[in-house]
Amino acid sequence: MPQNETIRDLQLDEYKYNFVTDAEPVYRARKGLSEEVVREISAYKEEPEWMLDSRLKALQVYESKPMPTWGGDLSELDAVLDEIYFYVRPQDRMEHSWEDVPEEIKDTFEKLGIPEAERKVLAGVGAQYESEMVYHSLREEWEKQGVIFDSIEDGLKNHPDLFREYFGTIIPTQDNKFAAMNAAVWSGGSFVYIPPGVHLDTPLQAYFRVNQERMGQFERTLIICDEGASAHYIEGCTAPVYSTESFHSGVIEIVVKKNARFRYTTIQNWSNNMYNLVTQRAVVHEGANMEWLDGNLGSKLTMKYPSCYLVGEGAHGEILSIAYSGDGQHQDTGGKVVHVAPHTTSSIISKSISKGHGRSTYRGLCKVHKGAHHARSNVECDALLINDTSRTDTYPYIEIEEDDANVGHEASVSRIGEEQLFYLTSRGISEEEAMAMIVRGFIEPIAKELPLEYAVELNRLIELEMEGSVG
Amino acid sequence: MSSEPMSDTHILKIESLEAKVATENLDILNGVNLEIGKGEVHAIMGPNGSGKSTLAKILAGHPSYEATAGRVLFKGQNLFELDVDERSRAGIFLAFQYPVEIPGVSIANFLRTALQAHLVDEEELDIFEFTDMLTERMSMLEMDISFAERHVNDGFSGGEKKRNEILQMAVLRPTLAVMDETDSGLDIDALKIVANGVNKLTEEDPEMSILLITHYQRLLNYIKPDFVHVMVDGRLVRSGGPEIALELEKDGYKNWKDSGAVSSGVPKTA
Ligand SMILES: Nc1ncnc2c1ncn2[C@@H]1O[C@H](COP(=O)(O)OP(=O)(O)OP(=O)(O)O)[C@@H](O)[C@H]1O
Ligand SMILES: [Mg+2]
């Protein structure tokens, strides 16, 4: 594929585009969302009829739903959406060059010590970084155990029945406007199946998945963790992801079957032009355990509330989230736990940091349905404000239909205290380092759950972010 | 920088220091004079609210207080020209009366960062040497090594916090240690252990000077002061030898307290 004879500045200059000689039939990317675009995507992916129908229905749902107004400010989103390409074939990806990548992002790569090859991928320039050797030996091992770890497209092609059984059942199209949008135009993402009783010690890293549209704008991931199995899936990285696109809307569906355990870790650091609207949900069956570990940095606005539907007796769901909002950023995040079966337990721990004019919102729901007797849930959300201009709000919704439910909620807001700063600096530590230390300490309960390399990167990132915050 | 040729004996020189709460018109120190020589141990005693901690915090550079008159020279240099962290690196250490909790930060990490900051010229702290040193200092203070992984003062008992202050002092090895009521909160055994630790440090570095703030004679049995000062209403109203502490133990501050204006430095009944 002529991947490198690319169409520069496609967005700006259609004229140029016409001069690109391409062996493939001319495929013209269109701005905005329409039935044609949806049909093209499906045709290009050579999808079965049912999938095309599903996409087209989703488009209708998307169009029928109003822009949500209950969360972050989406008033300018329509204009943004008119200008974006909902689908670009992999070989037509706009390859901006390294020179186009903003200096501050390059600077962050430098300071984080990201390897050269990786920087280019993160910046959307050049070939995908692959740890092929590592990946291949792991992959062989996984295949022996019957594990499927594929792109979502290959999942649909190679495992059509399994795919169809679960796709869209955890997050139905009607769920919300952006889930509907994703269902109409999804592209890229993972398809994962862990057979009964299989325990994976090595995390499945989206990072390893070769040759796919890893950071798709409308990625869709479907994970089935079968009975008694256990696994950990990791996605994203702490380094800033630079993209010329300014919209990301993913859907992650997970089924955790009886007595299985699953953890989904994601850390994302979008460039601050990005709207990041993601729906993540797990259905947790009897005696099973689901953990979301969610880190949100960067972006203009993130709205993301990982959720656990505890549908089997004794199911447990856990949501740990860290949000960092710098100047001009709004992290509207939290979690949802829905108790449907008896003796289900859940916990949400959310920590947010707001700096400068940054704003962090905790928005959470704990719902105990009739019949979910002996449910227990605990929610703890702590906000740390770095400057006087920083802002935080908390919207904890609790709906309980069972008398014996035990639901706790604790919220705290703190500022970096003068006394803490004085104490640390009185030991010779500079004020910036002291700030970073306090922030790292604040998120430690969650950071310690991260794989080591992520925790280390996150700490370095916080240090960078604290630079210039003193004053 | 308005530095003076360093006098060879004085490590700290406080001249007519007046200070107030930065955000309010509330005078706390009303003319403090004090000279501390190399290797000397000074004790300040005085009633609650007389300004002892304020003096200690001003030396360390606490932003809540503002010096309104007078000056302080540390090793001949105007102390007020240095930021809080610079003062520490220059050799001042304050053991807090009320140590502050830093959740999520381990003692080991905190001390490593602090000690690294004290190194000059980009020198890298050797992590193995550091760990050995920390282990040794902790055993000197009879602290369990597992404490190194606990979060700074988070959930510590009152006595554990005080001992942790002295651990930090033992790791950073200052030239001037200001100890604000380190003895309060320590049980009898802990007091001995901590005092022995401090004496060990003065053995290691005979030039280390100490300014002790205490309410009780007891501590002074272990750490022998060369001078004892009495602070009342933001002034040092009397200075002398260890015998002053014994007198105070007996009579309390009644001779000083009700005098509206103690300016002569002489008790009313004297
Ligand atoms: N930040 C502040 N704001 C208002 N008042 C203050 C502040 N700091 C100190 N003060 C007041 O100044 C006076 C001296 O306080 P300081 O803590 O120095 O006393 P102290 O001699 O150390 O007392 P103690 O023996 O009880 O520790 C007290 O009356 C105290 O209330
Ligand atoms: Mg005091």
Image (tube, coloured by chain):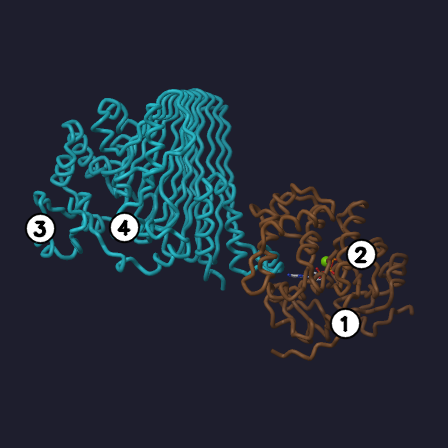
Residue found at x 10% / y 44%: A27
Residue found at x 77% / y 63%: B206
The label number, if any, that marks residue B215 in the structure image = 2
The residue where tag 4 is placed is A124
Foreground label between 4 and 1 = 4
Horizontal side of residue A442 vs B55, given as left or right: left
C-alpha separation, residue under disc 3 versus residue under disc 4? 23 Å
| Amino acid tagged 1 | Glu
Q: Is residue A340 visible?
A: no
Residue found at x 47% / y 49%: A459
Q: Chain of mark 3?
A: A
Q: Chain B drawn in what color? A: brown
Task: Mark 4: give few (<14), some (14-19) or many (20+) Cα within 10 Å.
Answer: many
C-alpha separation, residue under disc 3 versus residue under disc 2? 89 Å
Mark 1 lies on a secondary structure that is strand
Task: Mark 3: give few (<14), some (14-19) or many (20+) Cα within 10 Å.
Answer: few
Q: Quadrant location of the C terminus of chain B?
A: bottom right
On the image, the x and y values in percent for residue B94 come to 68, 59
Task: Mark 1: give few (<14), some (14-19) or many (20+) Cα within 10 Å.
Answer: some
Mark 2 lies on a secondary structure that is loop
On the image, the x and y values in percent for residue A277 come to 31, 43
Foreground label between 2 and 1 = 1
Horizontal side of residue B122 vs B129, given as left or right: left
Q: Chain A drawn in what color? A: cyan
Horizontal side of residue A112 vs A148, given as left or right: right
The residue where tag 1 is placed is B35
